[in-house]
Image (cartoon, rainbow, N blue to C red):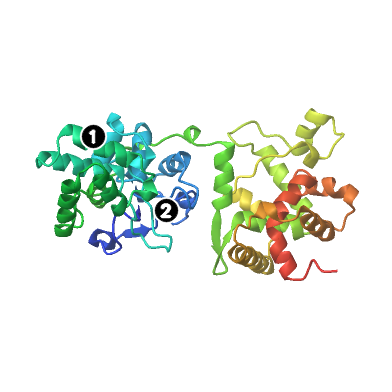
Amino acid sequence: MIHVFVGPTLPRSEPLLAAPDVRAWPPVQHGDLFDSSIRAGDTVVILDGVYHQAPALRHKEILAAMGRGVAVIGAASIGALRAAELAPFGMLGVGGIFAAYMRGEIDGDDEVAVGQSPDGEWDALSWPLVTLRHVLGLAQTAGLLDGERAAGLLADLQAVYYPQRTTSAVRAVCRRRGEEGFAGWLAEQRERDPYFGDLKRADALAAVRTALRGWAPRAEARPAPGTWESPYFRQWSNVFASQRVDGVQLFTEDRLLYQQVFNPQFPRTWMAYLAHRSLHPPGGGRGLPLEERLAQVTGGGLAAHQVFHPPVDLRDETTVSLLLADETRKDRQAVARYADALALTRRSRPGFSVAAVRGDLARRMLLRAWGCSERRLDEEASARGLVCAARAVQAAKRLVPGYLKEGRGEG
């Protein structure tokens, strides 16, 4: 399967995007490459991405995708920029824009950035600098501009903030510099050919054709885990880990948190996980029974959950099966309802964030769910793998909208 992340650079009606085995995605953003439908042996073509309206795609997400056997091609926009940065690791760059980044002729994000329609359409609302550079060069070739005049126009256009670099802004810059002739010529060319001078489009089509021809990197070029594994990456992968269960797509982290908060038996589950981790350390370290390891560290004076706080990797199937061992269908249905309540709160309250949920509401929810006193909250949180009360309160905030909606917080 070929996954093409594209937005303003190519229209939805582009025939290549309708080719067999091609799936067109919206502009890429942070988390998209964690999608379980992108598998080893697939090809990802990164063309367009988001910058402001959502977090941008991280380099380590691309490295991890390549590490698990996904071929990644970049061109045209953020794809060209990321390909220039990650070419030493096996990402393939295609086209003149990628080449210009590699040669150091251009280096800014705003060379390829454009304003995008806020209504979910893919239309570009402004001109990228790479296109303006190109059409200025074509105007010089046509004898309409000399080098000095073209450089002056380009400098003034660079000074315009990229989402404001609209056709009207381009005309205004031309009028201010007395270059109405160039503006008129450009308008005529675009009227004859809407894609005149559109380097991004040309490079994007070349990248998709490269994928359709079956390009694949050499197996030995696949990056090693050390190039992307980090606490931050593990956190991202946990956030985006999901699975379709009972006909519903659920985030694994939400399912785990529900167990930690609402399953009375979860301390037993957490101890089983600690015992497994002690016998099977990540990275192939020496395994020891949990009691023996605990004795070596503390002499047996503390409970294991008070001493060991291993990070959880929700990409690991064994870890997930251990931590969700007691999960029921009813639990999963509740997780879906809580997720819906959180999504509704976000839609209905502009600017809402989970961090803004009142901590006292989350704390009260935990006290009721765990049936413990305030004095024992730290101990109970630790026994459930949440380390301490403060961290448990922060984690549990995302459950508060659903908890209140179901009336469990009344009284």
Q: Which label was assigned to residue 38?
A: 2
Quick check: 262 left or right of 161? right
Where residue 345 sits, quadrant-wise, is bottom right
> Can the viewer see residue 384 in this picture?
yes
Question: Camera-side residue: 194 or 144?
Answer: 144
Q: Position of residue 175 (x, y in %)?
A: 24, 47
> Label 1 amino acid?
Ala
Query: From the viewer's perspective, is residue 208 above or below residue 369?
Result: above
Q: Residue at x 67, y 34 (%)?
A: 287
Question: Camera-side residue: 140 or 23?
Answer: 140
Q: Quadrant of the N terminus?
A: bottom left
> Can the viewer see residue 211 in this picture?
no
Q: Position of residue 75 (x, y in %)?
A: 30, 44
Query: From the viewer's perspective, is residue 221 above or below residue 254?
Result: above
Q: Which label was assigned to residue 7?
A: none
Disc 1: which residue: 151
Q: Residue at x 37, y 34 (%)?
A: 85
Q: Position of residue 48 (x, y in %)?
A: 36, 50
Where residue 110 sits, quadrant-wise, is top left
